[in-house]
Image (spheres, grey):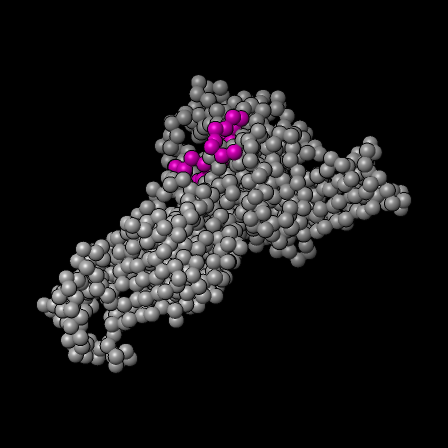
Amino acid sequence: MNQWIVHKFGGSSVADDGCFRRVADIVESSNNPREAVVLSACRGVTDDLLRLVALAEKADGDYASALAALETRHTQLAAALLDKAARDVYVAELQRDLVDVAGMLHTVRLIRGAPNALRDVIAGHGEIWSSRLFAPFLRERARIAGEVLWIDARRVVVVEWGPLGPVVDWQQSERRLRALVPQEFVGRLIITGFIATTGQGVPTTLGRNGSDFSGSIFGALLEAAEIHIWTDVDGVLSADPRLVPNAQVIDQLSYNEAMELAYFGAKVIHPQTMEPAIARDIPIYIRNTFAPLKPGTLICAKPVSAHAVKGITSIDSVALVNLEGAGMIGVPGTANRLFGALRDAGISVILISQGSSEHSICFAIPADQAARAEDAVRRAFDTELRSGHIQSVDVELGMSILAVVGDGMAGARGVAARVFDSLARAAINVRAIAQGASERNISVVVEGKGAAKALRAVHAGFYLSPNTLSIGLIGPGTVGRELLAQIGGQIGRLRGLNVDLRVRGIADSKRMLIEPGEIDLAAWPQRLQQAGEALDLAKFAAAMQPDYIPHALIIDCSASAEVAAHYREWLERGIHVVTPNKKANSGALPLYRACQEAARGAGSHYLYEATVGAGLPIIQTLRDLRATGDDVLSIEGIFSGTLAYLFNVFDGREPFSSIVRTAKQKGYTEPDPRDDLSGMDVARKLIILGREMGLTLEMSDVRVEGLVPRGLENCSVEQFMDRLPQFDGEMMTRYAEARAKGEVLRYVGRIDASGAATVGLTRVGSGHAFANIALTDNIVRFATRRYCDNPLIVQGPGAGPEVTAGGVFADILRLAAYLGAHL
C-alpha cells in the first residue's frame, strides 16, 4: 500500500474562491493515491473570531454584526464553489454553528469574560468552515480516484496542555484515527487544522502555528512519506526579504538548522511543529501555493546543500546585561546564582557570553524584561556589590542579536572570519559573541540601530559573490549606451565566472533611474523616461552603495566637469570610479591628486584607461613600464582619431575645409569641429600621461598649436564651416612643403621626462611609424631606458563608441580582478 503524503495549506492559501481552486489543482495534480489535506481557516478568520470574543466582553461591543460578516463571507464562498445541493447542506451546517457561536458569545457578554476553553471553541470554527467547504468542492470536481473524506480533528487528536504547550496522546490519537480511516483507504482526507480535544473531551486548540502542528501530527499518525507545508512564500529564505533584498530561498535545511533559525525569528515553521516529523524522520517541504512548480525548501535529517551557512537572522528589542567584578574570578557557583536568580524572576535568557578569565558574564534578554532582570541580579549579588567584589551590573538597551546558522559551519575554516570581516567592512561594532560547541550557530550582539545594516552585510558575505558590483552609470549617450549593451551581452557569462555586475542606476543630465534590484538592460531607455526622477547626484551615489552588496561602482561616461568634481567624495566613501571622462585627470592638479589620495586612503579603485586612446592599453602600458623600474624618456603620438583621419585623407587634391566638412557629415568630428581642431583634447590626454609619469603638469605647461584659424574661434558652427575655406591656402602650403621633402603632415602630441610638452602639426618622414597608420588610428610611441633603440609602440583604433566602451568595460573587469575575481 502506498504511503501517505500530507499537505497543509495556510490561511493565505484559502483566502478566497480563487485560492480554493488553486489548492484543489495542487491536490489533484498528485498521482499518489493516498493524501491528507490539512486546512487552516480562511485568511483572517481566526483573528475575526477572537475579535468577536473581545467585542462580547464589552458592554457595547457589536459582535452580532461581526458574526454576520463571517456568515456572509462563507456563504459567498459556498455560492462560488458548490452546486445548489451541496451549498444548501453547507449553509445549513454553517448556520447551526453560528447559532452555537452566538450562544457562547451571549454567555461571554453576561459574565464579562471568556474562559480559555470557551475562547478555544469559538476560535476553532474557522478551520471547520474552510475544510467542510473544501471537501464537497473537491468531491464535486471528481478529478481524483477514491473517496474524499472530511475529518474533524477533534475526533482524532487528543492533547493535554503542559508548561511547554500541547502534548499529544499518541496512543489514543492513533486508535481514534484507525477507527475513522480504514487501513485500505484510497483517496483524500480533508482535515481541520488547529483544533484538537483534551483527554476529558473538551475542545481545544494547538495554539498559534497550530495548523502547521496539525499537519505534522497527522503526518506522524499516518506514517507519511512526506509533509508539504503550503504558504505564500517560495520556501525558507536566507534572511528577512524586507531587510535583505537579495535574500534567497534555501534549498535544503536540517531539522536542527530549521529550529535554530526559527528560534532567532526567521519565518520557518515553529520548532514544536516539527517534533512529530523529526521523531519519525519525515521530510518537510515548505512550498508556495501561488507558485507550485517551484521546489521550495526541504527540511530533513541529512540535507544536501552547497551552502555552509543556511540563514542569517536577527532578534530586535534586546537588552545586554553585564555582570563584572574581580571577585567572580575562580569562584564556583557564580553562574548558578546568576541564572538561578533570573529563573526565579521569570527572565528568558536569549544569549550568554563569558570570557575565560571569568571576570565578567554578559547575557542578552528581551528588552521589556530588563528592569526586572537588573533588579533580580542586584538582589542576588547585593553583598558582593556593597563589598566591591563585584563592581557593576550594567544594562544596555537598544541591542539586537544577529545569528548566523548552518550545519556546514562545523569544522569549516574561515566562517567566523567572514562574519566578522563583513561586520568590520560595514563599520558594525560587535558587543558580545556566542558560539556553541556544535558550531551550528554564531551569534553576535550589535546596536539595534545598525542591525539591518549588519544583517545585510553578513548576508552579502555568504550569499553573494565577493565580486558583486552595484553599478551606477552616468551619461548614457553614445559611449554609455554601447557600454550598457556590452555589459548586457556578457552578464550571463561573467556570472558563470563569479563576477556579478548589477546595473542598478542610470542617469543622464536631467533624470536618473534607480532600481533596488537591477535594471533590465534591454529596456532601460523606456524605464528611464517612464520611472526616472530628477537627477540628484548625492542620492544617486548613496543608492549605488547599499550595505547588502559588497562593492559599489560609478561609471562616468559623460564629459561633465560637474560630475568629475564628485569623484573625490565618491572615492572617499569607498565607491569605485571608472571613467573615460578626461575632466578630473586633466583639470586642476589638486583635483587629480585629491582623487588619487582618496582612492588610496579608502582602498577604492579609480580607473580611467579609456581617457587616452579609448580601448588601447596606453595608461596600463605606462604604469607597467614604471612599476617594473623602467625610465620613461618620452611619449609621443597621434592621440586624436579625428585628426588622424583628416591628415590621412588630406593629399592636396581636395581642400582641407572640404575634408573637414565631409568628416563632420560622417560623424567623425564633434558637432563643433573646433573641439577637435583646437588641439585641446590632445593636450588633455598629454597632461594625463604626464601626470602618470609623475610630472606636475598643468594645461598652462603645454604648448598647443591649434588648427582653428584666428578670428573663427567664437563664431557659430555654421559661420565657422562657411569661412574655413578662406584658410585652405595656408594648409595647402604646409602640405606642399612636406611633400617636397618626402614627408607627411601629422598632428602629434609629445612629452618628455623634463616636462616639456607640445601639441601641434608636424612633418614626419614617409618611413616613420606615424606616417603609416589606418584612417582613424591612434598610435603612441614610448621611448624608455629599455626601449630606446626601438621604441615601444601601441597602435589601433582610438575613437568610436564600440572601442571606447570596450576600454571602459575592460576597466570594469580589471576592477573585478583587483577585488579577487579569476577571469
- Residue 347 or 430: which is nearer the viewer? 430
Whether 281 is among the magenta residues is no
Left or right of residue 651: residue 368:
right
| Above or below: residue 143 compared with residue 620 | above
Q: Position of residue 340 (x, y in %)?
A: 79, 36
Q: Determine the main secondary structure of the stretch shown in magenta.
A: loop
Q: Position of residue 405 (x, y in %)?
A: 57, 36
Residue 533 visible in this rendered orientation of the protein = no
Q: Quadrant of residue 753?
A: bottom left
| Above or below: residue 21 compared with residue 480 | above
Residue 494 visible in this rendered orientation of the protein = yes
- Residue 340 or 770: which is nearer the viewer? 770
Left or right of residue 557: residue 78:
right
Specify the quadrant that holds the C terminus. top left
Q: Position of residue 317 (x, y in %)?
A: 66, 49
- Residue 242 or 529: which is nearer the viewer? 529
Q: Residue at x 71, y 46 (%)?
A: 320
- Residue 180 or 383: which is nearer the viewer? 383
Specify the quadrant that holds the N terminus. top left
Q: Which residues are magenta?
A: 284-308
Q: Residue at x 84, y 43 (%)?
A: 390
Q: Residue at x 66, y 58 (%)?
A: 60
Left or right of residue 698: residue 63:
right
Whether 286 is among the magenta residues is yes
Q: Residue at x 41, y 25 (%)?
A: 33
